[in-house]
Amino acid sequence: MAKWLDNAVFYEIYPQSFKDTNSDGIGDFGGIREKLDYIKELGCNAVWMNPCFESPFGDAGYDVSDYYKTAPRYGTNDELKELMDEIHDRGMHILLDLVPGHTSVSHQWFLESMKAERNAYTDRYVWTDSIWEEPEGPGSLRGISDRDGSCLVSFFSHQPALNYGYYRPEKPWQQAMDAPGPRAAVEELKNIMRFWLNVGCDGFRVDMAHSLVKGDKDGTGTILLWQEIRAFLDEEFPEAVMVSEWGEPDKALAGGFHMDFLLHFGPSHYNDLFRCEEPYFSGRGKGDVSEFVRTYQENYKKTEGKGLICIPSGNHDMARLARGIHGDELKVAFAFLLSMPGAPFIYYGDEIGMRYVEGLTSVEGGYDRTGSRSPMQWDGSLNAGFSLAGREKLYVPLDPSADRPTVEGQAADPDSLYHEVKDLIALRQAHPALGNRGGIEFIYAEKDAYPFAYVRSAEGEKILVILNPSHEPASLACEYSLEKALKTFGGEAAAGDGRVTVPGGFYGFYRA
Ligand code: GLC
Ligand code: CA
């Protein structure tokens, strides 16, 4: 299995907003190439790039119209290959974004599937057998085809669901997982993966990985499907890495994924930390990390030794980290994100505290996600160095604030978030105990209380981490000596009588 995952730190690139090199206002492969050294310098050694395939962009590329061809606005297949080569030349790795659950309405398969006459794509999507019957699910496409039936959608109403079958078919039109239509969909999925793995990607982030088999409440059928994919990869591409958008690591890992995300949806309590009224990692927090830790521990037990639970700083679907957490609070949040087991994922711009841009009109199906998708802020030049296009041509408007953070500004300031993140990644990489596969024991994670403390361990090394995101001093009973500090922020801890007191807005790493 891919050894590089043991110390992978990922950087998520939203290609349309990262760096534009041909002045059309949209980021491109060339721009990513230009900035690879920046990513490497930060300490990230792996990239997840959001979908870059041909698409009408009704959902920013999560509505693919040709899985085998890159969208011209980013560059050609050959240019993507060159980008992959440059990534590998730097000892880095890249995951592409695979969207297996649905296509765009303009995909040729769907156009065929809408026809009244039977053809090779009739059963490629989930259709009822009468326009008057709607499938259960997020909605359906109806009355737009000669074919009599309603087609299930998987997310937006222009994203028809590919047919991987029903776990237990109940209606005549519901097909079993082993029926010819679903089998053809699985084989096509393997072909798509084969194609891009042969071009040179290192694996995939899989969109809505939990959702493929229908009528499958517990995920049993979907797990079986992914196990088949895993077996195919083991046979043909044993090094291929898979990370799922699932949000239930025990299920995803049972399906053969190496890693699963904790997300803003699902049972993880991830939002308690960063994205709610009073997030734990803000000074306004009332301090409840306990539910998060309880579910984390359950997941950890179920998945220990099998794969990684990934806690992202954010992604293209949720509000920016800096929307609810400000200033030095972000440093404490990153101390947490970069000291947990699993592979860290940093959403582009979070390392400089890029803000959520409020009040934007939706772009390409972004809706309230659009504010998290604004152009990367590189420097003080035109359009923050993102693009030389006229302002009105930029993919999403820039953060208009005069004090918007930039890479240039933060690189020049030794006290910036950028430097903190960089130092925290370096610390993680220097200590096996802090690494992706090291163990964790929570020593203080109480209901309605600060601080938060845990011990990471690996290869005989133990590191105590104490985080106090609140603005008040806090203390805990602690048997560890704090004599060997590896890194602290926000003051010093005081120890005595078996208790440790730390200042507000503090974090510390100690050899234990
Ligand atoms: C995932 C993607 C999101 C997209 C949706 C439909 O949640 O991350 O951006 O809109 O799936 O593909
Ligand atoms: Ca461009």
Image (cartoon, rainbow, N blue to C red):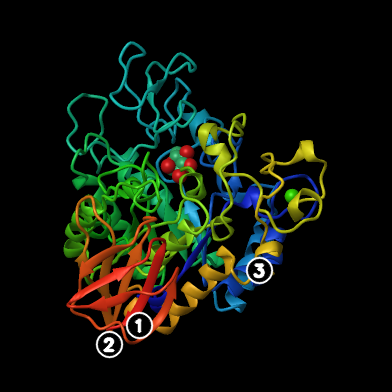
Is residue 101 positioned above or below 470 on the image?
above
Q: Position of residue 2 (x, y in %)?
A: 39, 75
**Alpha carbon of mark 2 to alpha carbon of mark 3: how far?**
35 Å
To which residue does mark 1 refer? Answer: 432
- The residue closer to the viewer here, 333 or 298, is 333
Amino acid type at circle 2 is: Glu
Q: Position of residue 221 (x, y in %)?
A: 22, 45
- The residue closer to the viewer here, 469 or 184, is 469
**Alpha carbon of mark 1 to alpha carbon of mark 2: how far?**
7 Å
Asked which quadrant contains residue 253, the reply is bottom left
To which residue does mark 3 refer? Answer: 413
| Foreground tag (2 vs 3) | 3
Q: Residue at x 42, y 56 (%)?
A: 312
Q: Which mark is residue 504?
A: none
Q: Position of residue 304 (x, y in %)?
A: 21, 68
- The residue closer to the viewer here, 320 or 152, is 320
| Foreground tag (3 vs 1) | 3
Screen quadrant of the C terminus? bottom left
Q: Does the residue tagged 3 have its C-beta within 8 Å of any atom of ligand 2?
A: no
Q: Between disc 1 and disc 2, whose residue precedes? A: 1
To which residue does mark 2 refer? Answer: 459
Q: Badge 2 local density, few (<14 within 10 Å), some, or many (20+)?
A: few
Question: What is the secondary structure assignment of the residue under circle 2?
Answer: loop
Q: Residue at x 65, y 68 (%)?
A: 413
Screen quadrant of the N terminus? bottom left
The reply to whether residue 246 is visible in this rendering is no
Amino acid type at circle 3 is: Asp
Question: What is the secondary structure assignment of the residue under circle 1?
Answer: helix
The reply to whether residue 432 is visible in this rendering is yes
Q: Between disc 3 and disc 1, whose residue precedes? A: 3
Amino acid type at circle 1 is: Pro
